[in-house]
Amino acid sequence: MAPSFHETRFTEARNGRTGGPDPADRTPFERDRDRIMYSAPFRRLAGVTQVAAVREKHLLHNRLTHSLKVAQIGRRMAQRLVKQNKGTWDAGLGQNIDDFPDIVECSGLAHDIGHPPFGHTAEKVLGEKMREFEGFEGNAQSFRVVTKLAVLDRVEWGGLDLTRATLNAILKYPRDRDQAKHEIRIDGNPVAWTDRRFGAKWGYYWSEKEHFSHARELPSGTYRTDADRQMRSAAAGLMDWADDVSYAVHDLYDYFSSGLIPLHSLRGNPDTAEFFQYIEDNVGAKYAGFSMDEFKRAYAELLPYMPTRKWTGSYRDRHDLDHMIHVVIADFNTAVRPLEASEIDVDVGSQYRAEVLKQLTHFYVIDRPGLRLIQEGQKEIIRQLFDALMVILAGGDSAVPPLLRDIHSNMKAHEEREGYRRRNSEERRARAVCDYVFLLTEDQALNLYECLKGVSVSQGSIFGAWFG
């Protein structure tokens, strides 16, 4: 059984000094939602890619629209669970179960707030640059943003000073990089990929250990096993499922309507050998307990709902695609049920159906040579930005962007207050540069790259896009 947080003020506790009476009469979790929504790192997600670059002419989801939909889907799922199970299930919140939808919505809004410009492409480069300094992980960066990098007017040292319950919900992977090197096992067996109580990645840096401990602390008692220590809260598990649903459904919508995923031809096309071989090579080996038979069954179950016409943008096309989206989201919404007093379970068949939709996007879009080529260029931009800023920051001259200077100087204050020590000044500079690059939108990253490399300078301005 997962640990529970049963004391009212315990779940609402903040780490800082901004938890007093609210003039707008909001609950603590409504305040959390507003703090996330009004933060600059959340707003910048409008300029961060979901799959294709945000400059694409097609109307595609970006990280902001994706996050809004994850929050909405998660909230509806949470509301359904509360309505159907109030009195018999408490999501680990005890008498605060009515706050569960707000907490899930907060975690959905914040779950991608740590994504850098160009998304996973830049994440790989920053991971390489930071390899000897604990690395870079988008989920850990999200936790760092809400606890350190975002600015709230009454928190002079940074961070949004969110409640304990909201921070715990944002921790999709409540473990550090060292723990993530080891497979989670229960009774000696690896955790199945469909077990939503756990995840394979990691979710916080050691510099945020104090905040992590605050978020995960129990009002009494301790975690019994290592698996307990790495188990998500019910809110985090539900947010993770809502994230999968939004990714599976809305990216598919984007790329069928853009002409890249031929949904209209799948129902009448029995030649699935190449797609299924791709799944065996790229998914089956990574997911513990993955079944190709279950995957193929899920694929067949989705075919009757696929559009039968090539997309032209007509009302009929939109109706057919919207009907499919409505059916699958309804399936995924009702797939969640309570498990134990503070855990959730997601129907295995629904998870396979979601995985089919996700992998269609991977097969037809993400692994396309054209996108791969663009991503190589994006990687080079991030590499050169990082290296140039490291040199500029070490020089300490007036060319250092003001935000980078502030991040670097505030970091030392954070560390002194929390008793955290980095190995040397180079590590501190590297983390500051990493934080700064990550906070750029894609247009800001491109503009700063042009400034530093002397590209298209004649078309630029002394007020660079990166300056805002």
Image (cartoon, rainbow, N blue to C red):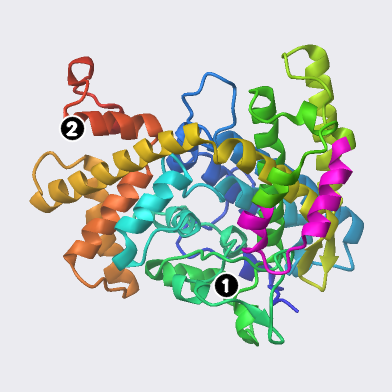
Query: Is residue 441 inside the magenta stretch?
Result: no
Q: In this orientation, does residue 86 appear?
A: yes
Q: Are marks 1 and 2 in contact (CB under 8 Å)?
A: no
Report whether 186 appears left or right of 350. left
Q: Position of residue 183 (x, y in %)?
A: 58, 76
Q: In the figure, residue 128 lies in which quadrant?
A: bottom left
Depth check: 178 or 22 in front?
178
Query: What residue is pinned by disc 2?
Result: 453
Quarter in which the C terminus is drawn: top left
**Residue neighbourhood size for the residue with mark 2, other residues' Cα within 10 Å, grouped as few (<14), some (14–19), many (≥20):** few
Q: CA distance from mark 1 to mark 2?
A: 45 Å
Q: In the figure, residue 134 lies in which quadrant?
A: bottom left
Secondary structure of the residue carrying numbered label 2: helix
Callout 2 amino acid: Lys
Which label lies toward us, 1 or 2? 2
Residue drawn at (53%, 45%) of the image: 36
Query: What residue is pinned by disc 1?
Result: 216
Residue drawn at (78%, 64%) of the image: 344
Q: Is residue 168 above or below residue 357?
A: below
Residue drawn at (30%, 56%) of the image: 129
Report whether 276 appears left or right of 391. right
From which residue to which does the magenta span run?
279-303
Q: Is residue 441 above or below residue 79?
A: above
**Residue neighbourhood size for the residue with mark 1, other residues' Cα within 10 Å, grouped as few (<14), some (14–19), many (≥20):** many
Depth check: 455 or 376 in front?
376
Q: Main secondary structure of the magenta part?
A: helix
Q: In the figure, residue 121 lies in which quadrant?
A: top left
Q: Position of residue 46 (x, y in %)?
A: 50, 32
Sequence order check, earlier mark of 1 and 2: 1
Quarter in which the N terminus is drawn: bottom right
Report whether 388 appears left or right of 291. left
